[in-house]
Image (cartoon, rainbow, N blue to C red):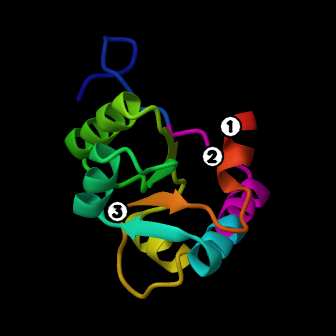
Amino acid sequence: RQSVAEGGRRKMAPAKKSKKSVENLNSRLQLVMKSGKVALGYKTSLKTLRSNKSKLVLIANNTPRLRKSEVEYYAMLSKCQVIHYGGTNVDLGLACGKYFRVSMLTIIDPGDSDIVRNQLEA
């Protein structure tokens, strides 16, 4: 092991979002699931990004780096915003009201929710 003084590097813990902002995102996400249209999962997210139907992409924080960067690249090409969800894929699945893991989801139609408009301001 190397100490920090000898040139070893320590990884910093990622900055945590406040609990209210996560709860706010979860409540907006639940409204989108009820009233809007979403695509759950990696494959369907890529399909919607390629066909330029996506408004917003949410990615869980334990998604592999290569997959994250690939989705971010497609989102950049389709001029779509990406949000890195604060929780794991299990948390994202539960926030969607599903009992399975969701690594990413794409919002096609936000419905009654203002999640897309609100994230553009932030």
The answer to which of marks 1 and 3 sits earlier in the sequence is 3
Q: Is residue 24 magenta?
A: yes
Is 107 left, or right, of 7 in this rendering?
Answer: right
Q: Residues within 10 Å of mark 2 (few under 14, many from 20)?
A: few
Q: Residues within 10 Å of mark 1 (few under 14, many from 20)?
A: few
Q: What distance separates the C-alpha of mark 1 from that of mark 3?
A: 22 Å
Q: Is residue 15 magenta?
A: yes
Residue 76 against residue 94 in the figure, above or below: above
Of residues 11 and 114, the one drawn nearer to the viewer in this rendering: 114
Disc 2 on helix, strand or loop?
loop
Residue identified by numbered label 2: 16
Is 59 left, or right, of 66 in this rendering?
Answer: right
Disc 1 on helix, strand or loop?
helix
Identity, as a three-letter code, of the amino acid under mark 1: Leu
Q: Quadrant of residue 2?
A: top left
The numbered dot on residue 120 is 1
The numbered dot on residue 103 is 3
Residue 87 against residue 52 in the figure, above or below: below
* Residue that appears at 42% across and 88% down: 99
Q: Position of residue 92 (x, y in %)?
A: 48, 68
Q: In what quadrant of the picture does the C terminus appear?
A: top right
Q: Position of residue 4 (x, y in %)?
A: 39, 19
Identity, as a three-letter code, of the amino acid under mark 3: Ser
Q: Nearer the viewer, mark 1 or mark 3?
A: 1
* Residue that appears at 27% across and 44% down: 50
Stretch in magenta: 13-26
